[in-house]
Image (cartoon, rainbow, N blue to C red):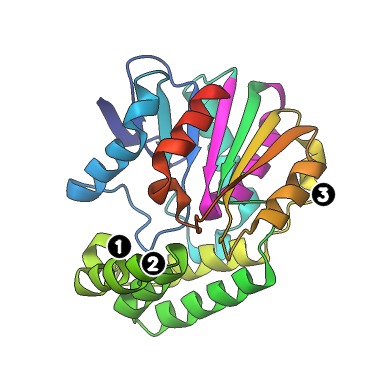
């Protein structure tokens, strides 16, 4: 299913393409400690997460350009994605934002105008909850201290609330931090996390012409259902779906339900 991946010569945005045709979906994932293209098991995990969608619609999954930390902002990232969409000649596009990639997705959709006909946000919204900002502050402090094991364990425990998340998944993240990402230099992760922490796209939502669907877990601490509903009210034509018993990691824990929602709204 993977047709190729490379850094575009103009923007430096690394991306993976899945499917056989010109992509009709641009996926903007959330922040990870490692911002480079994944390889090995992590790349296979990317393929697995979107494989069912790619059987119906080709897609491009875009990461972030390797910019100096002082140049990182939601606006510059969105400008890079717009350049990528133009270079790949993507029209009649669906933008799928996941987690902390959602503010970037909103800004990109606003900039693309008629090129973007559909906006889908999973575990995200126009701004973080107050608790979400506290969690990102904690993530920044851990990254600056180089405590990647602790960062992985705490984020996984928050993303998958319940005994399995706290004691099983979080323990795996602690034991195998390379699966989650452990860069030598935290500067990029810190700058990107700060940009999302401060992001408030509520006014920008009014500039998005595309219809939208938001899918948020009932127990999401970063972007709870009330944030999703507020975001939906600000968009031109949007609905908000709450996923029972799901946390911020709903894209994986409730993959089947989310995939059906995405495919039914394309």
Mark 3 and mark 2 residues within 8 Å of each other at the beta carbon: no
Query: Which element type, helix, strand or loop, lies under badge 2?
Result: helix
In the rendered image, residue 253, in percent from the top left (x then y), is placed at: 39, 50
Mark 1 and mark 2 residues within 8 Å of each other at the beta carbon: yes
Mark 3 or mark 2: whose residue is earlier in sequence: 2
- In the image, which is nearer the foreground, mark 3 or mark 2? 2
Q: In the image, is residue 147 above or below residue 30?
A: below
Q: Which residue is mark 2?
A: 156
Say the numbered circle drawn on residue 211: none
The reply to whether residue 254 is in sight is yes
* Range covered by the magenta-colored residues: 93-114
Mark 3 or mark 1: whose residue is earlier in sequence: 1
Q: Residue at x 60, y 77 (%)?
A: 134
| Residue 222 quadrant | bottom right
Task: Give the spatial CA distance, label 1 vs label 2.
Answer: 10 Å
In the rendered image, residue 209, in percent from the top left (x then y), is placed at: 76, 28
Task: Give the spatial CA distance, label 3 vs label 2.
Answer: 31 Å
Task: Give the spatial CA distance, label 3 vs label 1.
Answer: 33 Å
Near-viewer residue (114 or 220): 220
Near-viewer residue (161 or 34): 161
In the rendered image, residue 127, in percent from the top left (x then y), is placed at: 69, 58
Viewport quadrant of the C terminus:
top right
Query: Which element type, helix, strand or loop, lies under badge 3?
Result: loop
> Farthest residue toward the top?
21
Q: Which residue is mark 3?
A: 203
Near-viewer residue (235 or 265): 265
Q: Residue at x 55, y 51 (%)?
A: 244
Say the numbered circle drawn on residue 180: 1
Q: Residue at x 80, y 37 (%)?
A: 207
């Amino acid at each position: 299913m993977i047709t190729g991946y490379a850094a575009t010569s103009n923007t430096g945005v690394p991306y993976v393409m899945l499917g056989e045709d010109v992509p009709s979906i641009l996926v903007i994932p959330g922040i990870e400690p490692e911002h480079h293209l994944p390889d090995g098991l992590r790349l296979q995990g990317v393929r697995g997460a979107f494989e069912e969608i790619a059987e119906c619609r080709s897609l491009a999954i875009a990461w972030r350009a390797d910019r100096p930390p002082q140049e990182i902002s939601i606006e510059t990232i969105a400008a890079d994605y717009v350049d990528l969409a133009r270079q790949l000649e993507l029209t009649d596009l669906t933008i799928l934002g996941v987690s902390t990639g959602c503010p970037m997705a909103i800004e990109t959709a606003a900039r693309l105008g008629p090129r973007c006909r559909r906006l889908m946000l999973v575990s995200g919204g126009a701004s973080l909850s107050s608790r979400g900002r506290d969690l990102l502050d904690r993530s920044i402090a851990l990254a600056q201290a180089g405590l990647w094991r602790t960062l992985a364990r705490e984020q996984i425990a928050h993303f998958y609330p319940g005994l399995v998340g706290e004691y099983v998944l979080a323990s795996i993240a602690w034991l195998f931090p390379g699966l989650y990402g452990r860069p030598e230099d935290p500067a990029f992760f810190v700058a990107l996390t700060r940009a999302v922490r401060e992001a408030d796209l509520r006014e920008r939502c009014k500039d998005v012409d595309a219809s939208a669907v938001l899918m948020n877990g009932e127990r999401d601490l970063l972007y709870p259902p009330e944030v999703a509903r507020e975001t939906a009210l600000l968009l031109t034509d949007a609905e908000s779906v709450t996923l029972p018993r799901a946390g911020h990691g709903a894209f994986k824990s409730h993959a089947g339900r989310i995939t059906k929602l995405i495919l039914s709204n394309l």
